[in-house]
Amino acid sequence: MSEPISRKDFLKEVFGFFRTEVEKESRNIGIAADSFLLPPGAGGQDEFLQTCSQSYQCVSVCPYQAIEVFRNDPQDARYGYPVINPRRQACYLCEDFPCISACKSGALRMERKTIPLGTAVVLKDICFSYKGIYCPSCVVKCPLSGIAISMVDNKPVVQEEECTGCGICVQVCPTEQPAIRIKPSTQNRMEKR
Ligand code: SF4
Ligand code: SF4
Ligand code: SF4
């Protein structure tokens, strides 16, 4: 006869299933055009566009395939440059920053590796939790859960000064358009040109 499952194990199983479903769902959701960031170690869009040699070494070495080549609009000056869209794949801020090491042009620099990519901002009008539907995805998946983002009265609240802007919360948010976005730092902001 099988052992009765404890309440704790039951909740773990249910929650594990929920998380898997959220991950599957997040991969199926389309990419929002305004959510691109420059990779870690960038020094602002002007400098980046002048310095990046488009060798795509950073794209090749990223173990998470977090860096992609911007191909949205051939008329846009950013066309062909490496970017991050956290909705597709967030940055894991690898300890050794292989993307920066691989960049030989000086567009990505180690001395800028600690600059946050940006800050997460919850869009309360579309966030499930702010509509009364319990949704802990962003808080649970944040590598700094309880520090950069916490559940307060069953709603996610970001601590701006602790958030790295990695975008994992954006990737896992189950709303059709992400209810959490990254407000990019000056160094990582991308604007249409
Ligand atoms: S820090 Fe790591 S995950 Fe982030 S872009 Fe660089 S290589 Fe990819
Ligand atoms: S951007 Fe990263 S560190 Fe900031 S709240 Fe989201 S998952 Fe946490
Ligand atoms: S921001 Fe997204 S993941 Fe976080 S609580 Fe709201 S709906 Fe859920």
Image (cartoon, helix red, strand yellow):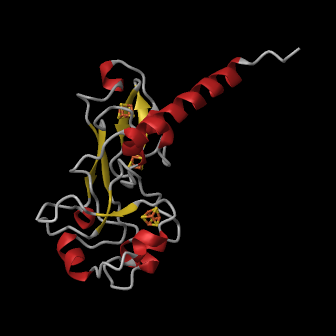
- Which quadrant would the N terminus be assigned to in this image? top right
- Is residue 148 left or right of 15 when viewed as pictured? left
**Foreground residue, 14 or 82?**
82
**Foreground residue, 136 or 161?**
136
Question: How many numbered circles does the render carry?
Answer: 0
Would residue 97 be visible to someone looking at this image? Answer: no
Taking the spot 42% from the left edge, 48% from the top edge, the residue there is: 168
- Which quadrant would the C terminus be assigned to in this image? bottom left
Where does the image place residue 82, in percent across and percent down from the top left? 31, 68
Where does the image place residue 124, in percent across and percent down from the top left? 26, 30
**Foreground residue, 7 or 190?**
190
Taking the spot 54% from the left edge, 35% from the top edge, the residue there is: 20
Would residue 173 be visible to someone looking at this image? Answer: yes
Q: Is residue 65 above or below residue 55?
A: above
Q: Is residue 137 above or below residue 40?
A: above
Q: Is residue 149 above or below residue 5?
A: below
- Residue 166, located in which quarter of the rendered image? bottom left
- Residue 45, located in which quarter of the rendered image? bottom left
Taking the spot 33% from the left edge, 31% from the top edge, the residue there is: 175
Check the image and name the residue furthest to the right: 1
Taking the spot 35% from the left edge, 80% from the top edge, the residue there is: 55
Where does the image place residue 23, in percent across and percent down from the top left? 48, 39
Where does the image place residue 128, in percent across and percent down from the top left? 34, 25
Q: Is residue 57 above or below residue 160?
A: below
